[in-house]
Image (spheres, helix red, strand yellow):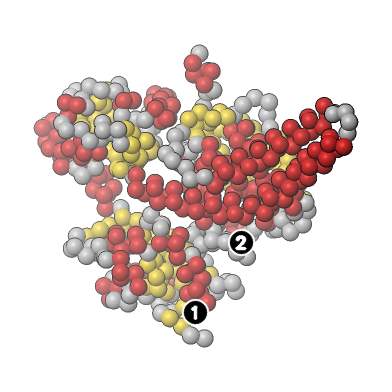
Amino acid sequence: MEKERGFTVPLRDHFKRLDPAFQHAAIGMALISLHGTFLQINSAFCDLLGHPRHELHSISHLDDAYSDVLTAIKEFGQTLRSGQLLSGTLEQPMQHLAGRLLQIKIHLHLILQEDGDPLHYLAQFEDRTPWMDIESRIRATETLLQDTQHSYHQLLEKMPLAVLITKKGIIQYVNPAGLRLIHAKDSSEVIGIPTSDVVDNSYHVALSERRKKFAESQALPTITYLINSLDGQQKFVDGFTLIISYEGEPAAVGVFKDITEQRQKEEYMMQSEKLTMAGQLAAGIAHEIRNPLTSINGFMKLMRSSKQSSETYYDIIESELKRIELIVNELLALSKPQGQHHSKPIDILPVLDQVITLMRVQSALKNIEIELERPESSLWIIGETNQLKQVFINLLKNGMDAMDAAGTIRVSARSGDQEALINVKDEGRGMTAEQIERLGEPFFTTKDTGTGLGFMITQNIIHNHGGSIQVESVPDQGTTFTVKLPMTPSPEEVQA
């Protein structure tokens, strides 16, 4: 069989079909042979190392340019294989085309053939240089603060990422990178204003919860905010906070990175997956709408032939029309491109109701029942409704795809220790421990067709909501997905 740089023609065609997802990944990615040669790279890999994108189609020269990196990957891969491991990480310096040295963390995944033999590696290249520089400078800053405030300011002024220092939520200092981030001309426009004026209203609850958690446990995890620049432009930022001494008093120093472009790429992948789901559901939707239309047509004929109108006929027709409207609205909400997402307090139970209503259309065609067990009281979380719908549609669809015969998918929702817990349990073919371990890897799927991106996107959405997802499965006995999302007080409790 014809080969091209280490893999067969059918495999090459397989990756061509996955090329849009591969190329639009926000992180640099490459397929690497077991012998240590590049098979394929994406656009983000070129951007990371300064290569023009036309090199995507001619990469043979990269083997010599990064021979030391490929050797390290090959040796590390052999260590993984000897330890019967499928993935691991290694740190490796890489030279940017402009000459600067980058500190790269390489996430290496072993891709297996259908018979279980190793095929090649999928490598993800994460640039840790900015964060290592920041961590180093922050540590140096804390030492400098003990000696001189002036030296501390000099360091912050030269930092490439935005830095804000606040006391009790009021901005005391912002560096030049911070001024550029929020489009301020000078610090006088920012000093003295509360951070809530910069953070968008949709994230005020998250801001308040973070301050409350710090008061209770002195912990400040990394955070993502939507901010409003002074000119009205909105941006997503990712950052962390340290508590320091500033001018003799405790203060919070926040270091932030603009991730707006990265979020846009993630939105592109999510929207692509949503459109795929909408297309797969379309046949079932058409079938489900045809049934109430037949009922309406029949009752209209009865009313025409009847000398006396029946109020019952009107009630049935109205009920069937509302049913059609509900199904169509849910499909449109799923497939419609979304504008700027805004997190806000939402009750997760109506979201589950709406998703199950939509998915029952598809499940009825496969003789699968969807049962919902829910508490009487609401389960409030901070989230984005359409993204959460996509999570539970993914999980229900995966459950139906895993079931080869009629059965039941059981969805249950309850409150745990300050968490909302939603279980989705199917009666499908189940998964092995090895398959569970690989869930979320790019391009890994247990289906005959698929890209594996659905679960990866599901994980990403849940992570962005501050939650987690767990998987329990037994071959031939089914799978249970457990989604955990942090709960928040209801709007009525907050106002009280």
Q: Residue furthest bottom?
A: 1
Look at label 2 and name its amino acid: Thr
Q: Residue at (56%, 41%) from the top-left corner?
A: 333
Closest to the observer, 56 or 120: 56
The disc at residue 9 is 1
In which quadrant of the rendered view does residue 310 lie?
top right
Look at label 1 and name its amino acid: Val
Closest to the observer, 259 or 466: 259
In which quadrant of the rendered view does residue 72 lie?
bottom left
Check disc 2: other Cα within 10 Å, few if <14, some if 14-19, many if 20+: some
Is 67 displayed left or right of 107 in the figure? left
Q: Earlier in the sequence, mark 2 or mark 1?
A: 1
Separation of disc 2 and disc 1 at Cα? 22 Å
Residue 86 versus residue 363 in the image, above or below: below
Q: Where is residue 217 in the image (x, y as percent from the top left)?
A: 41, 28
Q: Residue furthest top?
A: 496
In which quadrant of the rendered view does residue 248 lie?
top left
Q: Where is residue 40 in the image (x, y as percent from the top left)?
A: 39, 70
Viewer-side label of 2, 1: 1
Q: Residue at (33%, 34%) from the top-left corner?
A: 227
The disc at residue 446 is 2
